[in-house]
Amino acid sequence: MSATLYVVGTPIGNLEDMSVRAVRTLQQVDFIAAEDTRVSLKLLNHFEIKKPMVSYHEHNAREVGPQIIRRLQNGESCAIVTDAGMPCISDPGEDLVRLCAENGIDTKVIPGPSAAVSALALSGLDTGKFVFEGFLQPQANTRRERLEELKLERRTIIFYEAPHKLCDTLNAMYQVLGERKITLARELTKVYEEVIRTTLSQAVELYTQREPRGEFVLVVQGAKEEQKLDFAQALALVQALVERGEPLSKAAKDVARQTGFKKGEIYRRLMERDVAIYGLSVVGTSLEQSFMELLYSMKRDFEQHGDASMIVTMFDNAYEQAVRLANNNSISVQRMATVE
Ligand code: SAM
């Protein structure tokens, strides 16, 4: 084996999940960098692998990382493993891979199970788009701030959590994120594997009655799509209703009720927009010509849709002029009630 760092995934509970390639790699490398050599020794013993190990964890990574790099530069091969699952995922390894990249040392992955992806797969929640958050900070303030930042996150969110912090975390999640679905994936691949698909409020209640035990992944539903239409969408909706044959007045009233925007405001903006559009098509012509363009467009609208209320509202501030121009051109104009 040439100088390469192998990032080797190991089981998250069930030793049968160790891949054939992972076993072979551990047999063939010159040495293994292990998060906790006592934990990894059990794995090696199970597969009858005898290999020198160096301890590599977050507290000695700065010192041991460069030593591993020197050995790799001298032609040795190394496998990095952690206590469970994929190295580098809420586990040591990230820095070592970066050092290898910086020093032009080859890296290869021997993929294995990861609690995050395994829990997501069982969650029953949207798996199309997701984000991995790992562990939240234990301090209440920092944890809350992070949750606030995630409040509008639409994608499914995956968290790791230790059992003794579970209740506090669930409470904080419920307070900040509000009611939504959550799947608690516990002790995956182990004897007491359990998947609880519930809501945040129910999860809070459940774990006030039950002591959390074992390892947990929390898979939380993303924020629901905001149902409220913005103003542009409200205008588009009015227009769509009018095109489907609803009188403008009724369409504006209905949409105003639905969205909370003022009916008068919807009208005004629709008019302004139409004036702007029609105005644009007559750029370079006189004001009178612009008015004429508008009148003819309105006449066409009236003939097509049978609803001419737009005409009157548009010309609210220039009514006299519009009437004069219209009359000169045999177009009849009536003043209708002004929309409030
Ligand atoms: N690198 C690992 C991986 O790829 O999944 C994760 C290591 S992280 C230090 C440990 C956390 O992963 C645990 O606190 C728990 O949240 C989650 N975890 C690990 N094994 C698990 C299992 N069998 N069932 C549920 N969660 C697990």
Image: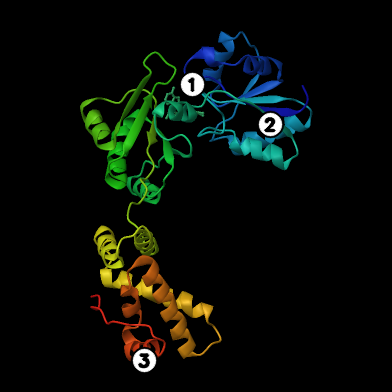
The location of residue 248, given as percent across then percent down, is 31, 66
For label 2, the residue is 68
Instruction: Say which mark, if any, is on residue 125.
Output: none
Q: Quadrant of the N terminus?
A: top right
CA gap, disc 1 and disc 3: 84 Å
Q: Do the CB atoms of the residues marked 2 and 1 lie less than 8 Å apart? A: no
Q: Residues within 10 Å of mark 1 (few under 14, many from 20)?
A: many
Query: Which element is circle 2 on?
Result: helix
Q: Is residue 9 above or below residue 274?
A: above
Q: Amino acid at mark 3?
A: Arg
One can see residue 70 in this view:
yes
Disc number lying in front (2 or 1):
1
For label 3, the residue is 324
Instruction: Say which mark, if any, is on residue 12.
Output: 1
CA gap, disc 3 and disc 2: 90 Å
Query: Which element is circle 1 on?
Result: loop
